[in-house]
Image (cartoon, rainbow, N blue to C red):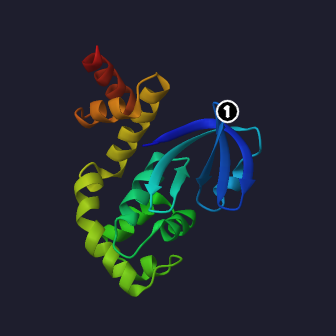
Amino acid sequence: MISMLKGKVAQIAPGSLTVMVAGVGFHVHVPTGNEKQLAPGQEVLLYTVLIAREDSLSLYGFPDPRQREIFSLIINVSGIGPKTAMNILANMDPNRFLDEVVSENINYLSSLPGIGKKSAQRIILELKEKIVKKYQRLGREGYEVMEDAVEALIALGYSETQARKAVCNIKADNVEDLIKQVLKEMR
């Protein structure tokens, strides 16, 4: 699985990029609008999801690991594919999406591109419990502290898997304390 790409932007198209990594160009679908913030030759780090189908391999990339996690949640809802999930992520804040699903706001969800009332109900039915278990128990601030600590540990040279495993087992009120405790544990 390709979980992350770091390289230079070679080509830009609406909703996609070609990222050169060690001489290999990866075609990556990105939420529409994200490509406008980049320029050819610029270095980029994308958190990715690889989707294998019978006739293709498609790579989806996100500048924020939260977007990748939400993309993975959305595409597991029956009847919603990667294209619709990308359209949703292009038009919303990831934290707001989580809040709206938990509060069962069908009107907001059905206003998202490609989502009707039935799809909104399905999203709530299939995702609410998962979101509450995974995100709400931490609270938004706890989740953001955890994500910031993971990013800092990756910058220190740890793999994303190592960082996430270490951070999940430790509770702290702020990023600095969390990183200190993780580093003590990892020695």
What is the x, y in percent for residue 180?
33, 21
Q: How many marks?
A: 1
On the rendered structure, is 178 left or right of 66?
left
Q: Which residue is mark 1?
A: 23
Query: Which of the 4 image quarters holds residue 70?
Result: bottom left
* The one of 99 and 90 positioned closer to us in this rendering: 90
Tell which residue pokes out farthest to the front in this image.
55
Q: Of 32 and 94, which appears nearest the observer?
A: 32
**Whole-percent x, y for residue 148 in the image:** 43, 37
Q: Secondary structure at mark 1?
A: loop
Q: Residue at x 55, y 39 (%)?
A: 5
Quadrant into which the C terminus falls: top left
Name the residue located 28 percent from the left edge and 19 percent from the top edge. 186
Query: Which quarter of the figure is the N terminus placed in?
Result: top left
Q: Residues within 10 Å of mark 1 (few under 14, many from 20)?
A: few
Looking at the picture, how far across and down is residue 44, in whole percent?
63, 39
Image coordinates for residue 22, horizontal then vertical, percent = 63, 30
Give the residue displayed 50% in from the left and 76% down from the top: 112
Residue farthest top in this picture: 187
Does 16 appear above or below 142? below
In the image, farthest residue toward the bottom: 117
Q: Vertically, is 100 above or below 13?
A: below
User: Mark 1 belongs to which amino acid?
Assistant: Gly
Please name the residue shown 27% across and 70% down the image: 126
Q: Left of 148 or right of it: where is 34?
A: right
